[in-house]
Amino acid sequence: EIVETLGSIERYLEGLDGVHNDSSARYEVEVASDKPPRITVTRPRSVVISVETSSVIHLEYRATDAVGLQSVDLVARSGSDDEITIAVIPSRKDVPTDSHDSNPYVRRRWERSVRIDVTRFAIEAGGALPFVLKATDVRGQAARSAEHQLHVDFLPAIPEGGEWLRDLA
């Protein structure tokens, strides 16, 4: 139950077998304003991630929210400043709950490792692609991680023939 105003809340308990308490318990409630979620890329720690054009990168992150998380997306910015968004979290119904969560579809903390196929972004050799992870809570508030960059290393073509091996000696 989400309480949104200052005041009190009263609870009367009754078990499945019909046993109940004779009086309800009253609790004073002090409401704090809801804040956007927090998200951090925990691995790799480097802001610039060097990859090859055909690489798969492994990202680990931690996202938290006081009310509950809705989604986590990877948001990349292409050369034309268009945003490319890729969902990195399954839908809420597929996410197992923490034991302290009362709603089986809302989770307050996600710590995950995801694999991202770099070929999805069509980054040319020597190019870079800035990206962030964006966490959205169940109320629609969003926050972004610090910006990271995928940098595709420039790999020169391998010369044909075996003569270039003699030059190395």
Image (cartoon, rainbow, N blue to C red):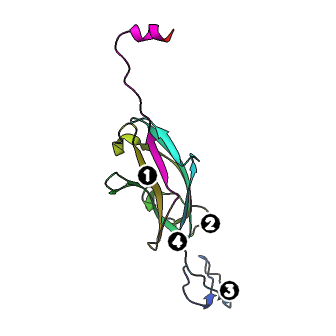
Q: Nearer the viewer, mark 1 or mark 2?
A: 1
Image coordinates for residue 101, horizontal then vertical, percent: 58, 67
The residue to which callout 1 is attached is 130
Give me the disc on residue 36.
4
> Is the Cβ of the residue at disc 1 closer than 8 Å to that at disc 3?
no
Of labels 2 and 3, earlier in sequence is: 3
Which quadrant of the figure contains the N terminus?
bottom right
Q: Is label 3 in a helix, a strand or a loop?
A: loop
Image coordinates for residue 6, horizontal then vertical, percent: 60, 90
Q: Is label 4 in a helix, a strand or a loop?
A: loop
Residue type at the position of mark 1? Pro
Image coordinates for residue 166, horizontal then vertical, percent: 45, 7
Q: Nearer the viewer, mark 4 or mark 2?
A: 4
The residue to which callout 2 is attached is 100
**In the image, which residues are magenta?**
145-167
Query: How many angstroms separate mark 1 from mark 2 (CA)?
Result: 36 Å
Query: How many angstroms separate mark 1 from mark 4 (CA)?
Result: 22 Å
| 165 inside magenta stretch | yes
